[in-house]
Image (cartoon, helix red, strand yellow):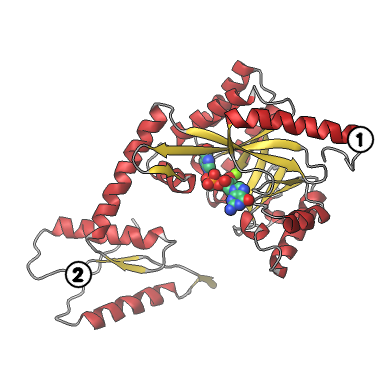
Amino acid sequence: GDEFALLISRSQMSGRLLKFVDDLTHALKQPLSYNKTDVQCGASIGVRRIESSATDVSALMKEADLALLSAKSGGGGVWKEYSEGFKARIRGQRELAQDLAKAIETNSLKLQYQPIVDAKTGAVTGVEALSRWYHPVRGTVSPSEFIPIAEDNGIIIELGDRVIENVIESAVEMPANTKIGINISPLQLHSSRILSVIQQKLNDTGFDPCRVELEITESVFLSDNAFILDRLRKLKGSGVRIAMDDFGTGVSSLAYLQRFPFDNFKLEHAFVSVIETSDQSRAIARATISMAHARKLTGTAEGVENDMQARFLREQGCDELQGFLFSRPQDQAALIPYLRSMEMVHEAKSSKGDNVVEMKRT
Ligand code: C2E
Ligand code: MG
Ligand code: MG
């Protein structure tokens, strides 16, 4: 549908060939005028140089395709030339996908929970559930690596179902009022199973739905918005909260997102981490928080690592803070005693009248 092959015949002039591919990539990036509108397209190019002895056309096309995949993987708009290393990498990824499918099937992915605190009082208001995969040979594989693999291989739905079920089951043991954030992949949101899986688990456990906060990212809005709006409304109808995760990295403005039923905006770590040095990040953080409040929504800052960041965000009226400054993600076994001890600290502070302001913005 959207792939083209170009056969270029050159004899012994590889320098000119690569210059041609460079020029082609550049030319394809130029805006086109269509119906009085400028349309910006672009292309990724996979290059396979053919030796005169090569005869297996289908193998060569597959190899050109591997180069194309590699060109696309970094965001596209570039060209890559095929090398033997590509095959090994693809094989490695395929094996990893198979191992991941097995880990999901045997329910052996683990969960860690990172506490989220009230910016004013320091009391723990909730936790975010984060999936962990300990591979027997490769060791710890980060979710930033295995979630995209699960998405590419259609196993994210299975993974997401397990996460929802396991998180709600574990959450029953957490102190009342602890909110539970669950990351939801855009593909999961498109699957009709999400509604029934959540509903079923809430019914089985009797867990209060308003303690569940589904975290979705802006990439959800790259597709059919009417469908997404309807899906989010149905989820909200089951009583759960919806958060916009990693806010600020995408292209949507709060004004655009206002039609969707969010309860909370999570300010992306990338802004928080440069608050001390970047005027622009400070301005974005400030604007996000005040616009969220104007819409009667709450704001959570992610990736808070030092006191200066926490102070600035608190001064801007940010509602909740999350980051290594407060706690790293923890296993459930460590989390429950941690939450109880934090509750006790907070109660002691309250009874001494230490500057405890209202617990939660509604
Ligand atoms: P996220 O939802 O934005 O989660 C926050 C990430 O920031 C976590 O990375 C967390 O460990 C990290 N983090 C928290 N505080 C700090 C800090 O102070 N400094 C720094 N440098 N990092 C901090 P993690 O666990 O590696 O997860 C990465 C991403 O993978 C998550 O980003 C989320 O998008 C995705 N993910 C994790 N678990 C799941 C899951 O069960 N399902 C889906 N669909 N996605 C998941
Ligand atoms: Mg998240
Ligand atoms: Mg995030």
Q: Is residue 11 left or right of residue 206?
A: left
Which residue shows up at 61% across the image and 58% down it?
Answer: 270
Q: Is residue 294 left or right of residue 69?
A: right
Label 1, residues with CA under 10 Å away: few <14, some 14-19, many ≥20? few
Q: Nearer the viewer, residue 172 or 1?
A: 172
Q: Please determine whether, in this image, residue 354 is positioned above or below residue 197.
A: below
Of all residues shown, which one is farthest toward the right? 353
Q: Nearer the viewer, mark 1 or mark 2?
A: 1
Image quarter for residue 268? bottom right
The numbered dot on residue 198 is none
Q: Is residue 304 above or below residue 129?
A: below
Q: Nearer the viewer, residue 159 or 27?
A: 159
Q: Position of residue 347 (x, y in %)?
A: 83, 31
Q: Which of the pair 326/159 is nearer the observer?
A: 326
**What element does badge 2 sit on?**
loop
Query: Are the two marked residues, 1 and 2, in contact with CB atoms closer than 8 angstroms?
Result: no
Q: Look at the numbered disc 1 and give the secondary structure of its residue.
A: helix
The kind of residue tagged 2 is Arg
Residue ID for mark 2 = 49
The amino acid sitting under disc 1 is: Lys
Q: Which residue is mark 1?
A: 352
Image spot of residue 231 (x, y percent): 60, 36
Q: Position of residue 54 (x, y in %)?
A: 10, 64
Pinpoint residue 248: horizontal percent, then vertical percent: 64, 57
Mark 1 / mark 2, whichever is N-terminal: 2
Height in image: 209 above or below 56? Answer: above
Query: Is 183 on the left or on the right of 102, as rendered?
Result: right
